[in-house]
Image: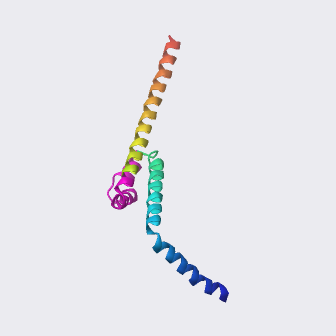
Amino acid sequence: MLRRRLALPERLNAARATVSAEPDVLFKHYIENLVFLLQRVVEHVSLATPAVIHAQFVQEHSPYIRANLHLERLSPTAAATVTQYFLAVQAKLKQTAVQELIADQTRHDLLLSHQE
């Protein structure tokens, strides 16, 4: 137990030295992780009801908006990446909805033509 207590301060000192020696690496990983998390939020929330989408992506104090503003202050380029991802997901959802509507209309038209 005593040996473990002595090792802990040594490990903490080593960790502190690594962190202070390479803050740019940690900052880079922090931004990458934040981008990844925000993109996963976009994926999940985009499939929700319009009310949920509005609450998460539009309301000023939503966690997504706060995190995105935080990311924009840290790295405008990374924030732009998340915005582009959001727009791409929305475009894909819209395209899928249009394709489903066209397929439904085609099926409906075929049913009507067979009934005649």
Asked whether 15 or 115 is in front, the reply is 15
Any part of residue 55 in sight: no
- Name the spot of residue 60 as percent of width and height, x first: 32, 57
Any part of residue 3 in sight: yes
Asked whether 4 or 44 is in front, the reply is 4
- Name the spot of residue 38 as percent of width and height, x first: 44, 54
In this picture, is 13 found above or below 100?
below
Q: On the picture, is 36 further left or further right than 56?
A: right
Q: Residue at x 62, y 83 (%)?
A: 7
Characterize the magenta stretch by its predominant secondary structure. helix
Residue at the extreme top: 116
- Name the spot of residue 3 as percent of width and height, x first: 66, 87
Asked whether 115 or 17 is in front, the reply is 17
What segment carries the magenta color? 50-79
Q: Is residue 1 magenta?
A: no
In this picture, is 26 found above or below 53?
below
Give the quarter of the image for residue 95: top left
Q: On the picture, is 106 further left or further right than 56?
A: right
Q: Residue at x 49, y 13 (%)?
A: 113
Q: Is residue 68 magenta?
A: yes
